[in-house]
Image: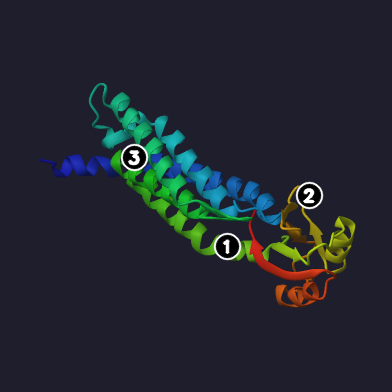
């Protein structure tokens, strides 16, 4: 049965110093992950600042605790325990990877669930930190993860970025649209057609074009409601669909 001395071993001065050092590693990893994620968010990609920040921070947590195996379980580990525990951690990370893959969904140009998957992985790392006795580091990781999910999305909204819109156009039978004309139409309304996103489908002589248009400037781009009115008057278009995309 755990005694008071056993429990107190998790909060000794050396353990607190170790947890503080782990915290600064987590904070640094979060900031660097946010920096890399902003580049993706700026270009309208699905994996943005929150996803990159969470993954980078959780990876740092798993790596840094490996360097302090002597402090696991309050320093009360037995010979060989560190090796066995590292194998358990490997199994947890592998299993959570399959679980995270199950929450990522793709529909057309839209990808959803990436931040949820990253937060699940971060939650598993929080559990690992608690399991090896890094309680303060676990609390710090939980707080930073919650902060990332609640507030980083607002930061992304405030920072300059390029909003992406997924557009599907269906043309009248026999009509052959021109790619330069579509590019010109998008450009006049503050959008660029993202390279490599145009997909063309033909059914019974009816052409359907799908592509992603990226705003040149989010503050000055044409609202999607106004854009729909403009597209409705585009030559040859009979049906269309617009929705914000994270590709």
Asked which secondary structure carries label 2, the reply is: loop
Q: For residue 237, which quarter of the picture?
A: bottom right
Q: Nearer the viewer, residue 135 or 33?
A: 33
Residue at screen point 51% across, 57% down = 148
Residue 106 horizontal/vertical position (percent): 55, 53
Q: How many marks?
A: 3
Query: Seen in the image, is 87 located left or right of residue 228?
Result: left
Residue 198 horizontal/vertical position (percent): 75, 52
Give me the C-alpha separation between circle 1 and circle 3.
34 Å
Q: Is residue 164 visible?
A: no
Q: Nearer the viewer, mark 2 or mark 3?
A: 2
Q: Would you call the spot at circle 2 few (<14 residues within 10 Å), some (14-19), or many (20 or more)?
A: few
Residue at screen point 60% across, 45% down = 32
Q: Would you call the spot at circle 3 few (<14 residues within 10 Å), some (14-19), or many (20 or more)?
A: many
Q: Is the Cβ of the residue at disc 2 closer than 8 Å to that at disc 1?
A: no
Q: Is the Cβ of the residue at disc 1 closer than 8 Å to that at disc 3?
A: no
Q: Nearer the viewer, mark 1 or mark 3?
A: 1
Give me the C-alpha separation between circle 2 and circle 1.
26 Å
Check disc 1 and report the residue beneath it: 153
Q: Which mark is on residue 195?
A: 2
Instruction: Compare marks 2 and 1 and give the one earlier in the sequence.
Output: 1
Instruction: Compare marks 1 and 3 and give the one earlier in the sequence.
Output: 3
Check disc 3 and report the residue beneath it: 15
Give me the C-alpha separation between circle 2 and circle 3.
52 Å
Asked which secondary structure carries label 3, the reply is: helix
Residue 116 horizontal/vertical position (percent): 47, 54
Q: Would you call the spot at circle 1 few (<14 residues within 10 Å), some (14-19), or many (20 or more)?
A: some
The answer to whether residue 69 is above or below residue 189 is above
Instruction: Compare marks 2 and 3 and give the one earlier in the sequence.
Output: 3
């Amino acid at each position: 049965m755990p005694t008071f001395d056993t429990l107190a071993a998790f909060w000794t001065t050396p353990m607190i110093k170790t947890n503080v050092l782990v915290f600064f590693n987590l904070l640094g990893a979060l900031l660097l992950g946010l920096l890399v994620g902003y580049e993706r968010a700026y270009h309208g990609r699905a994996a943005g600042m929150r996803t990159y920040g969470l993954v980078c921070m959780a990876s740092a947590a798993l790596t840094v605790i490996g360097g302090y195996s002597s402090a696991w379980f309050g320093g009360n580990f037995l010979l060989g325990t560190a090796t066995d525990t590292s194998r358990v951690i490997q199994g947890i990370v592998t299993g959570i990877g399959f679980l995270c893959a199950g929450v990522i969904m793709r529909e057309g140009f839209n990808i959803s669930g990436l931040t949820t998957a990253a937060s699940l992985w971060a939650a598993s790392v929080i559990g690992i930190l608690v399991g090896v006795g890094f309680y303060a580091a676990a609390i710090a990781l939980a707080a930073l993860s919650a902060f990332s999910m609640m507030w980083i999305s607002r930061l992304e909204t405030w920072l300059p970025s390029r909003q992406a819109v997924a557009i599907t156009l269906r043309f009248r039978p026999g009509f052959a649209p021109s790619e330069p004309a579509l590019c010109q139409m998008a450009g006049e309304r503050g959008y660029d057609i993202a390279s490599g996103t145009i997909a063309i489908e033909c059914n019974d002589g009816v052409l359907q074009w799908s592509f992603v248009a990226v705003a040149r400037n989010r503050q000055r781009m044409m609202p999607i409601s106004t854009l729909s009115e403009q597209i409705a008057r585009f030559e040859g278009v009979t049906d269309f669909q617009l929705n914000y995309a994270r590709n």
